[in-house]
Image (cartoon, rainbow, N blue to C red):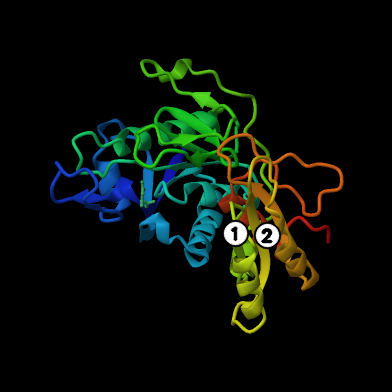
Amino acid sequence: MQKVVILGTGGTIAGTANDPSRAWAYQAAQLSVAQLIEAVPALQGVPLEAVQVAQVDSKDMSWSIWRQLGRALHVQLARDDVAGVVITHGTDTLEETACLLQALHDGAKPVVLTAAMYPATSPDADGPGNLRDAVRVVQESARRCLGGVVAVMHGRVWSAVDVRKAHSHALDAFDGGGASPLVALAQDDRSEAVWPSAWPTCGRFGWGYLEVNPPRVEIVCSHADADGWLVRAMLAHAQTSARPLKGIVVAGTGHGTLHEGLAQALREATQQGITVWRSSRVARGGVLAREGDEWPAVPHLTAAQARVALTLSLLGAGRAG
Ligand code: ASP
């Protein structure tokens, strides 16, 4: 039987609290991934290996941690005795990591991100159940020859590009931005869940992109009174900083529309060679591309995911040759 490798990166799933009665008084990223596995009786006897890649609150996620994660995935997924990988992660930036891995992974084996909303010491900790489900999803995906990147939370399997944190404190914190989960894991008998014939296609760009230092890409938001001040402030420093600004993702209103004051500043940015992509600040539905658009629409990604996609694009990912 092939193994499942669990890569730990921290998050609330590895968090501990001193006072369980105060739900939010806890420290994320305290327990090792080996300790998380020990706390799940259903994983006893399952062939697992644990590797601690990082130990952070995922609000502090960084390109250098993604680089470590990419290196670990490169090694583990190449092993013949490994069916797939689970990544334990914080919920805050899970959607960014998922989107990045989806772009880089070759899609041959399953990579499943999971997380928790309550720390490991909470009486209602959701991490053990999510970890158990994530391991099962790797095993079941491998059995069905499904490869790619998905996220498993609260009994649902989400596509890496759909998944997003949609609630700041509910246990059922994730949704798909209007898309449905790929699989709803049945609560009683999980083997009865309906599985698709394929996971969404990966970008296959390769882990090597993480070895390069990324260009600076920032996010701005359109809103009432958005007169472009922030964009012009960025432009004033764009070329003098150690990591010059190369891209801007703008989170527009509705289906990606922009305040005219902000649009004017973004035209100035474009003239200075900065790439601008449009996403939406609206939770569901995404941006509709239209004829005559000044800036490309990122149809479905959140602004934070679009920042990842634009970074990879500026690094040349997806460009022929
Ligand atoms: N701040 C935590 C993190 O993202 C939140 C969580 O995991 O739920 O690591």
Q: For residue 171, which numbered disc appears in the image?
A: none
Q: Does 15 sit left or right of 73 as displayed?
A: left
In percent of width and height, residue 254 lies at 64, 40
Please give the residue where the numbered disc 2 appears in the rendered image. 262
Q: Does 285 sit left or right of 53 as displayed?
A: right
Q: Nearer the viewer, residue 284 or 321?
A: 284
Whether residue 316 appears in this view of the structure is no
Going by the numbered disc 1, the residue's amino acid type is Val
In percent of width and height, residue 262 lies at 68, 59
- Identified at 27% across, 50% down, the residue is 15
Please give the residue where the numbered disc 1 appears in the rendered image. 220
Going by the numbered disc 2, the residue's amino acid type is Leu
| Quarter containing the N terminus | top left
Q: Nearer the viewer, mark 1 or mark 2?
A: 2
Q: Secondary structure at mark 1?
A: strand
| Quarter containing the C terminus | bottom right
Q: Above or below — where is 274 with respect to 56?
A: below
Q: Nearer the viewer, residue 271 or 53?
A: 271
